[in-house]
Image (tube, coloured by chain):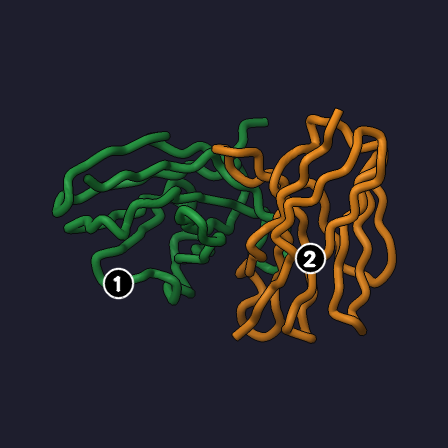
């Protein structure tokens, strides 16, 4: 069974710090990796996606992928209280299901003013 | 442009009733997905549409669940003879194409079975 694992948290960081969120996945053939942000009572919002090994930066967000280690991370620089949310890691696996997102349980991030 | 639209946003119904949930994907998106998020649970895949066809229904929990898509656009998820364990947030997503593409979610339908 394909699995995506995240530390449930909560992860608490002070305002202005770097928040580091981590995710591991079991399907070595996975091709696509996504980070979603979910505020309490709201639906998931796509914030980053990455397909290749290395780093991808978008504003304050950086996604990092290491396929050899089956590890993907999200860094949030200059964290703001408005970044407080649950962050969901999602992976599209290999084989015939290259459309199905498998989600981790999410990491709750709290940014303290 | 407009995002994925779902209706109703909330639905409360009695056990044993049928419910119909609607999803209108982003214009031009050929792939459409239904997921479910239960309290304390992660997001679980239900069904995937490419055009009007559903190549993968593997996530539907039982034969009380069915879905269709018409005109390559709007999709309806129907739950017959609802049970309390069906209470969840039902989320619809769409993507430009099905393979390895970012999926964008609607606001969801919060279903409560009394």
Location of mark 1 (residue): B62
- Where in the figure is residue A112, as x and y percent of width and height? 73, 29
Q: Outermost residue, top direction?
A: A113
Q: Nearer the viewer, residue A92 or A113?
A: A113
Q: Nearer the viewer, residue A5 or B9?
A: A5
In the displayed structure, would residue B33 be above or below residue B25? below
From the viewer's perspective, tell me whether residue A100 is left or right of residue B65: right
* Mark 2, other Cα within 10 Å: few <14 / some 14–19 / many ≥20: many
Whether residue B74 is visible here, answered yes or no, is yes
Using the image, name the chain to which the residue with label 1 belongs: B
Image quarter for residue A84?
A: top right
In the displayed structure, would residue A4 be above or below residue A15? below
C-alpha distance separating marks 1 and 2: 29 Å
Image quarter for residue B61?
A: bottom left
Which of the chains is green? Answer: B
From the viewer's perspective, tell me whether residue A6 is left or right of residue A21: left
* Element under disc 2: strand
From the viewer's perspective, tell me whether residue B44 is left or right of residue B78: right
Image point 24% across, 33% down: which residue? B12
Image point 75% across, 24% down: which residue? A113
- Where in the figure is residue A28, as x and y percent of width and height? 69, 75
Chain A: its colour in the image is: orange
How many dots with numbers?
2
Location of mark 2 (residue): A33
- Where in the figure is residue B19, as x and y percent of width and height? 22, 41
Q: Mark 1 near mark 2, Cβ–Cβ under 8 Å? A: no
- Where in the figure is residue B90, as x and y percent of width and height? 39, 44
- Do the residues marked 1 and 2 share a common chain? no
Image point 50% across, 51% down: which residue? B31
* Mark 1, other Cα within 10 Å: few <14 / some 14–19 / many ≥20: few
Image point 36% across, 30% down: which residue? B9
């Amino acid at each position: 069974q394909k699995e995506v694992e995240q530390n449930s948290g909560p992860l608490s960081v002070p305002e202005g710090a770097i928040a580091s969120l981590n995710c591991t996945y079991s399907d070595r053939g996975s091709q696509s990796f996504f980070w979603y942000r979910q505020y309490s009572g709201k639906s998931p919002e796509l914030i980053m996606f990455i397909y290749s090994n290395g780093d991808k930066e978008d504003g304050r967000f950086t996604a990092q992928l290491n396929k050899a280690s089956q590890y993907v991370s999200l860094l949030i620089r200059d964290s703001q209280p408005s970044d407080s949310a649950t962050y969901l890691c999602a992976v599209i696996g290999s084989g015939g299901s290259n459309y199905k997102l498998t989600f981790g349980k999410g990491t709750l991030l709290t940014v303290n003013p | 442009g407009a995002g994925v639209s779902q209706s109703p946003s909330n639905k409360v119904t009695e056990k044993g009733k049928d419910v119909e949930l609607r999803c209108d994907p982003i214009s031009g998106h050929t792939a459409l997905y239904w997921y479910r998020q239960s309290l304390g649970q992660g997001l679980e895949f239900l069904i995937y549409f490419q055009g009007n066809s559903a190549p993968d229904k593997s996530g539907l929990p039982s034969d009380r669940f069915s879905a269709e898509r018409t005109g390559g656009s709007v999709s309806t998820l129907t739950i017959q003879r609802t049970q309390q364990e069906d209470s969840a947030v039902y989320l619809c997503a769409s993507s430009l194409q099905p393979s390895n593409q970012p999926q964008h979610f609607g606001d969801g339908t919060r279903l409560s079975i009394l």
